[in-house]
């Protein structure tokens, strides 16, 4: 009985530590609501640490192709993320046009993009550290790297 309790304690603590590690960078959140007949309602949450980890399982040929396609934008994106980290809570773009509203900002170290229109609403929240990890991994496979 004591052996079973120790095994359960070990398994439980492993699950807690794995969960804490997985969520340490935060959560990527994508919410899309279409307000029309047959409209989609997509709400997706993903641990931010899962994306760079999943990239290790992408076949080398595919990751090299993605890196080649993004090679011109990667240094710029890397510099933008580095600079955005200096402003953890700042509004960068806000456009209001009649009944449409778009806002892009950083909030709590995350990039937040909100779009509100009469027939749809989109909300994207992504930790800057996750974007930085992905760009760093893609830069490793960039041509000439």
Image (cartoon, helix red, strand yellow):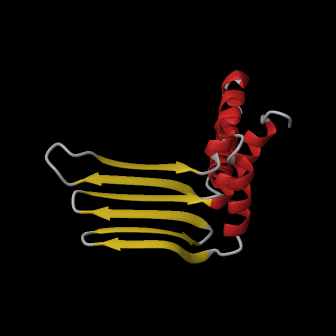
Q: As rendered, which of 83 and 57 lies closer to the eye?
A: 83
Q: Position of residue 59 (x, y in %)?
A: 68, 23
Which quadrant of the view contains residue 126? Answer: bottom right
Residue pushed farthest left? Answer: 37
Count of number-bearing discs: 0
Q: Residue at x 59, y 72 (%)?
A: 108
Q: As rendered, which of 99 and 46 lies closer to the eye?
A: 99
Q: Residue at x 26, y 45 (%)?
A: 40
Q: Position of residue 142 (x, y in %)?
A: 78, 36
The quadrant of the image that shows the C terminus is top right
Q: As rendered, which of 99 and 106 lies closer to the eye?
A: 99
Rendered view: 7 above or below 117: above
Q: Position of residue 92 (x, y in %)?
A: 54, 73
Rendered view: 139 above or below 123: above
Q: Does any portion of residue 45 appear in the rendered image? A: yes
The quadrant of the image that shows the N terminus is top right
Q: Residue at x 53, y 70 (%)?
A: 105
Which quadrant of the view contains residue 116? Answer: bottom left
Q: Does any portion of residue 57 appear in the rendered image? A: no
Q: Is residue 43 left or right of residue 21?
A: left
Q: Position of residue 121 (x, y in %)?
A: 31, 59
Q: Is residue 134 left or right of residue 120?
A: right
């Amino acid at each position: 009985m004591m052996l079973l309790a120790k095994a359960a304690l070990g398994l439980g603590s492993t699950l807690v530590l794995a969960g804490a590690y997985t969520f340490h960078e935060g959560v990527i959140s994508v919410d899309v609501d279409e307000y029309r007949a047959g409209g989609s309602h997509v709400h997706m949450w993903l641990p931010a640490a899962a994306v760079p980890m999943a990239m290790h399982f992408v076949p080398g040929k595919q990751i090299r192709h993605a890196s080649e396609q993004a090679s011109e934008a990667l240094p710029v994106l890397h510099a933008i993320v580095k600079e955005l980290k200096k402003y953890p809570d700042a509004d960068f773009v806000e456009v209001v046009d009649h009944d449409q509203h778009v806002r892009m900002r950083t909030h709590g170290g995350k990039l937040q993009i909100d779009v509100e229109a009469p027939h749809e609403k989109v909300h994207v929240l992504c930790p800057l550290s996750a974007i930085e990890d992905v760009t760093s991994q893609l830069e490793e496979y960039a041509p000439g790297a």
